[in-house]
């Protein structure tokens, strides 16, 4: 699982692309990924803006290893009231290598649960996607964006 953090560090830079949110609304996503503390972690800043310029979502995220070595994602988002801790639960390999971080039990519909997926495509694109379920609602894919690198 430590290899997941090393792979993530290879995608340093700024990415942008068009996505769709949970309401079916198109947006422009911008993701900045940069290593911190000599590569011990990666800082992400993500902003989603509607086509009319309205801010839809903003978050600051830090990914690093817990003392046990387990990769962990901690995020502060404009859509939630506080910090959320997500643990790496899968490194899926397919068209893209996808790091899957999870908060909560996706099968427990009595609580909020969320999955953040970071996909790293062979040609250099990055996908940032969210699946979540509010208490009493099903857990499902809600929002995502595939982005190309636009700078450092």
Image (cartoon, rainbow, N blue to C red):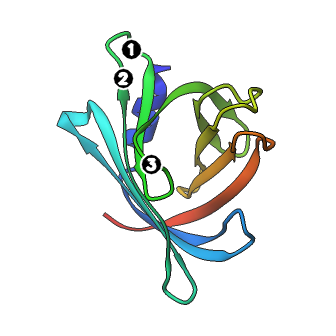
Farthest-out residue, right: 138
Q: Residue at the spot x=37%, y=9% of the render? A: 68
Farthest-out residue, top: 68
Camera-near label (2 vs 3) is: 3
Residue 120 placement, left or right of 37: right
Q: Are marks 2 and 1 in contact (CB under 8 Å)?
A: yes
Residue 44 placement, left or right of 116: left
> On residue 65, which mark appears?
2
Question: Residue 128's spot in the image, x, y percent?
Answer: 57, 53
Farthest-out residue, bottom: 52
Mark 1, residues whose alpha carbon is within 10 Å: few (<14), some, or many (≥20)?
A: few
Farthest-out residue, left: 37
Cα separation, mark 1 vs mark 3, equals 28 Å
Mark 2, residues whose alpha carbon is within 10 Å: few (<14), some, or many (≥20)?
A: some
Q: Is residue 70 above or below residue 45?
A: above
Question: Residue 33's spot in the image, x, y percent?
Answer: 36, 52
Q: Is residue 59 above or below residue 10?
A: below
């Amino acid at each position: 699982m430590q290899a997941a953090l090393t792979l993530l560090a290879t995608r340093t830079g700024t990415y942008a692309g068009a996505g769709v949110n949970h309401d079916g609304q198109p947006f422009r996503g911008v993701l900045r990924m940069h290593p911190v503390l000599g590569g011990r972690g990666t800082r992400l800043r993500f902003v989603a803006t509607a086509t009319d310029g309205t801010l839809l979502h903003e978050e600051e995220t830090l990914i690093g290893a817990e003392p046990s070595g387990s990769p962990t994602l901690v995020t502060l988002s404009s859509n939630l009231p506080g910090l959320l801790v997500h643990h790496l639960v899968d490194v899926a390999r397919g068209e893209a290598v996808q790091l899957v971080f999870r908060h909560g039990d996706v099968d427990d519909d009595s609580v909020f649960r969320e999955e953040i997926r970071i996909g790293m495509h062979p040609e250099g694109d990055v996908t940032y996607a969210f699946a979540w379920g509010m208490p009493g609602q099903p857990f499902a894919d809600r929002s995502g964006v595939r982005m190309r690198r636009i700078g450092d």
